[in-house]
Image: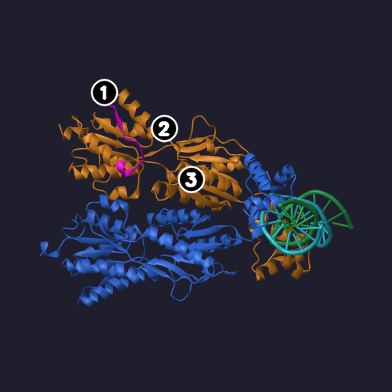
Chain colours: A blue, B orange, C green, D cyan
Amino acid sequence: MTLKELAEELNMSTTTVSRVLTGQEKKYRISDKTADKVRAMAKVHQFAPNQIARNLRLQKTNTIGLIIPDISNPFFANLARTVEVELRKRGKMVLLCDTKDETELERESLSLLMGRKVDGLLIAPIGKEHHHLIQQPEIPIVLIDRYFEDQDLSFVTTDNFLGACIATDFLIEKGHRNIACIQGLLKTTPNEGRVSGYKKTMLDNGLSDYIKVIGEDYSIANGYESTKTLLSLPEVPTAIFSLNNQISMGVMKALKEHRLEVPGEVSLISFDDQPYFDLLSPPLTAIKQPMSEIGRAAVATLFELLEGNHPPNQMLKPLFVERSSVAPIYQKP
Amino acid sequence: MTLKELAEELNMSTTTVSRVLTGQEKKYRISDKTADKVRAMAKVHQFAPNQIARNLRLQKTNTIGLIIPDISNPFFANLARTVEVELRKRGKMVLLCDTKDETELERESLSLLMGRKVDGLLIAPIGKEHHHLIQQPEIPIVLIDRYFEDQDLSFVTTDNFLGACIATDFLIEKGHRNIACIQGLLKTTPNEGRVSGYKKTMLDNGLSDYIKVIGEDYSIANGYESTKTLLSLPEVPTAIFSLNNQISMGVMKALKEHRLEVPGEVSLISFDDQPYFDLLSPPLTAIKQPMSEIGRAAVATLFELLEGNHPPNQMLKPLFVERSSVAPIYQKP
DNA sequence: GTGAAAGCGCTAACAA
DNA sequence: TTGTTAGCGCTTTCAC
């Protein structure tokens, strides 16, 4: 049923009906009697305005595009959930695009979403290239997790540097000196932040000789291979700091294969906490990113942008979740 | 830039431009020269048609609504990924709704998506109520995972009955007799299928005295509490069959707290495989649902429906993934 | 207080 | 081979 049909049935103009249904009755001083009649009839017919027509007329879709590299990664799945819930609260819906970590798909997603005239964009970019992120015409964009120093797009992210400092500090306090770091995707801001935090802390503690960064992406395979490499070193590290959850899984797998006990023989801290970390053997000590906060902050930032403001970028504090994958070094002389 | 502006710049009618850009040049025998000019100019201006206007005119949005109870559950996250990728291949985008396992939100999502005139709906329903799933006007709907016997909506699901039979059979073959089953949400088809499979297999093997079904939803808490109850029984089961991944996490937690060794003292099989099952201690034996296949089948079914066909419902075969959480019973007399 | 009519940007029936 | 025009369903300016 259309607005027009409804109006005909009521013997009124579409204007009046529309005004009542969009809550502008006061503004146009429509009589209560008329308004009530309209509402009653609308209810009877379960009338719902055609959003497409509405969008076209209003030049606004109440739709936000959400672009993420891999929704099957729990990190992003959690993010997607918070974002969806927050946006819905504010009357927006989300068009989801999974880029499968392929820049080409990211580019494509972006133009598809622009064609659909989304009101704004929430992007967890892949991060290798990023100039395609700025589109014509410009619409509000908030980057999540990864961002770019040479572009002034708004972003919300974890304070990766701080997180890495906390993790490294903790290991050092437990007496570790030979601490290796297995990194994720090179040249992406989170990775660089984490690596810097690690390096800085090592340096500050006079452990520059032990600084060892290895690895190249956020994958199980990378964690696995990198660990194997570390184990083949003349001086095997007593602790590993792994820069995301997937890498940690690879590390665990390799360690298990080599029958090395954690934390007895090798200690491990992971960036990115996950619910199942509790159930691993041993339960993994981790730096937890505040996912819900990130999601909420991203949405809030986007709304500021939509309202024409200039919200500040946000670096949210990570949490330290101590479990039992780190042992003091003096246990093993 | 709009089609009209483009046409003006080319000194042509919008009709011609539209025809070329929608690939109907042959049909209307538009001269190559004209067509080339149009394409060239469109490229120069990076013209992309306004999809909102297009949708309104065509009465079709090329958008599919995806409604799921919890995208942060890896089961649904995986599903969402396959679905998104498959739909995109076929030129559709997805509007995502997370219902947080609340029927009210499911209802709301449905009407929001109807208002946006999605071409079809993919729903993993919560399953407690379901009459709101049939909307006016009717549009193609495919249910995923859960479905309803008394409604003839198309569905794609795992053969839950078969999966449960395989799991139970395996335990029995290993010599277990006292096998408990921790179930998920009551009165939902997957749960009922799994429970029936368990019961049937126990019955067929003359173990009716040992049939024990406990639990009430798909949560970690339920797995945890139910396990505690089982452990307080005079005759503690030698094996537990847990009906989903979340429940299994709760089971593991409770078992760990009680310092019961798996599989030494209690064996465990889980419905729903997850990547991290490999890393648990011990690695969990599981019944794996073919997520990618389910996603692909759901999309394929939806397209059949969109084309006016009557595709058959699908029950896909689960896979048995043997790891090391089940021990033969004679190890423990 | 209410309504007529224009127009958002596109496609397609009909005309030429 | 190309163009004119109506209309998808809604909101809103302007008029009464």
- Mark 1: give few (<14), some (14-19) or many (20+) Cα within 10 Å: few
Residue located beneath label 3 in the image: B105
Describe residue B213's horizontal placement relative to residue B29 as left or right: left
Q: Residue at x 35, y 44 (%)?
A: B273
Q: Which residues are magenta?
A: B208-221
The residue that disc 2 covers is B187
Q: Name the chain letter of the residue that bears numbered label 3.
A: B
**Marks 3 and 1, how far apart in space?**
42 Å
Q: Secondary structure at mark 2?
A: loop
Which residue type does callout 3 highlight?
A: Leu
Q: How many numbered marks, from 0 up?
A: 3
Residue B183 in percent (x, y) is at 34, 35
Give the quarter of the image for residue A216.
bottom left
Chain letter for the residue marked with disc 2 in the picture: B
Dot 3 or dot 2: first in sequence order is: 3
Q: Chain of mark 1?
A: B
Q: Which residue is mark 1?
A: B209
Rendered residue at 38%/59% (across/down): A291
* Mark toward the start of the polypeptide (3 vs 1): 3
Q: Is residue B104 magenta?
A: no
What's the distance in space between the residues labelled 3 and 2, CA to CA? 20 Å
